[in-house]
Image (tube, rainbow, N blue to C red):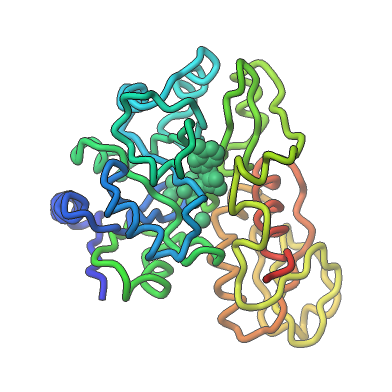
Amino acid sequence: MARTIDIGTDRQAALEAASAALADGFAIAIPTETVYGLAADATNPAAITRIYETKGRPRFNPLICHMADLAMAEEHAEFDPVSRALARAFWPGPLTLVLPLKPQSSIHSLATAGLDSVGIRVPKGFAGALIGAFGRPLAAPSANTSGGVSATSAAHVEADLGARIPLILDAGPSAVGVESTIVKAEGGRLRLLRPGGLAAREIERVAGQPLLRAKTASAAIEAPGMLASHYAPGASVRLNATAVEPGEALIAFGSAAVSGANSARIVLDLSPRGDLAEAAANLFDYMKRADASGAQSIAFSPIPEEGLGEAINDRLQRAAAPRD
Ligand code: TXA
Ligand code: MG
């Protein structure tokens, strides 16, 4: 069983217990502003192996490496001027940059799945402080079984991974609620590999250029694990619903009128006032609640494809994708 420490009341104890567990090569759950992460020392191959095993994650799917600050990031990755401008504008925050790995980086090749690039971000709040205290980058995917719905609370982590990890740090619900936006620097141009908690237009405004979005054949390799079924609850998922079938769960948005709603097993609204940031923060928790209602199918109201709606729709399409 995992020990849970509330960082609101026991911040120092949390820092010490986490640093000790990380130094011993364990994978532990830590809060970030996007989702809870399953973190381990990115320079320790045995520790990274624990992440893959705990999640049941394919090892060809590289992990994001989390840094304390831009200075630590520059020890491991090669920044071009545009990437540096993005880092200065948005770190700490929900932006991951995929950059060339420096040959002298101590990040282990298991974390990068042997690629010559590395996905890097500086998380907000406690996670950043923990990395600073620990002194080494932390590899951290979302703290959930591979293919399942990401964890946005300590209770989500406990329910899914509690029996497999020693420590969960609890900072309450994740503020952003969806994973970071991933952008890859390609010779001065920027490619969006995964929409996420930072809206694409914010990145375009600072970069002074549009993000490349064309899905190429290599997108499967560049964002592995991101194409097939993912973020999948137990129930099946039906998108753009304007009517509910009896016994379905309904997850609405913006107080949308949905016929048959009174015969739904449960009705949740991601944001009654139509705020996409609020909807993102509620998304994974509501998916888990709809799942727990026992419904065989979850119907979602349409979500506008603007701002954080792009990340929400991306996660919903993967949740609705055929499963193997
Ligand atoms: O918000 C987040 O990003 C969360 C929190 C915990 O920080 N982390 C997260 O990590 O989602 P992870 O490891 O699951 O992110 C993985 C995505 C994968 O789809 C992977 O393919 C992509 O990042 N990625 C990592 N390194 C890459 C690289 N060198 N090249 C291309 N994609 C990479
Ligand atoms: Mg994940």
**Residue furthest top as drawn:** 81
Callout count: 0
Kindly tell me whether residue 34 is visible in this rendering. Answer: no
At x 65%, y 44%, the residue is 308
Which is nearer the eye, 155 or 95? 95
Furthest toward the front, the residue is: 114
Give the residue drawn at x 44%, y 46%: 63
Q: Image quarter for residue 129?
A: top left
Which quadrant of the view contains residue 253?
A: bottom right
Q: Quick one: 215 or 12, which is closer to the camera?
A: 215
Which residue is at a point 73% across and 34% down the rendered structure image?
213
Can residue 74 be seen here? Answer: yes
Left or right: residue 261 versus residue 289 is: right
Quarter of the image for residue 133 reads top left
Q: Is residue 1 above or below residue 40?
A: below
Who is closer to the viewer here, 271 or 321? Answer: 321
- How far across and how far down the image is residue 280, in percent? 59, 53
Left or right, 307 with reference to 47:
right
Q: Residue at x 16, y 54 (%)?
A: 24
Percent of width and height locating residue 21: 18, 56
Q: Is residue 6 above or below residue 122?
A: below
Q: Quadrant of the C terminus?
A: bottom right
Q: Left or right: where does residue 89 sit relative to residue 22?
A: right
Question: Residue 186 at x, y = what percent?
Answer: 61, 22
**Percent position of residue 26, x then y:** 24, 58
Q: Which quarter of the image is occupied by the N terminus?
A: bottom left
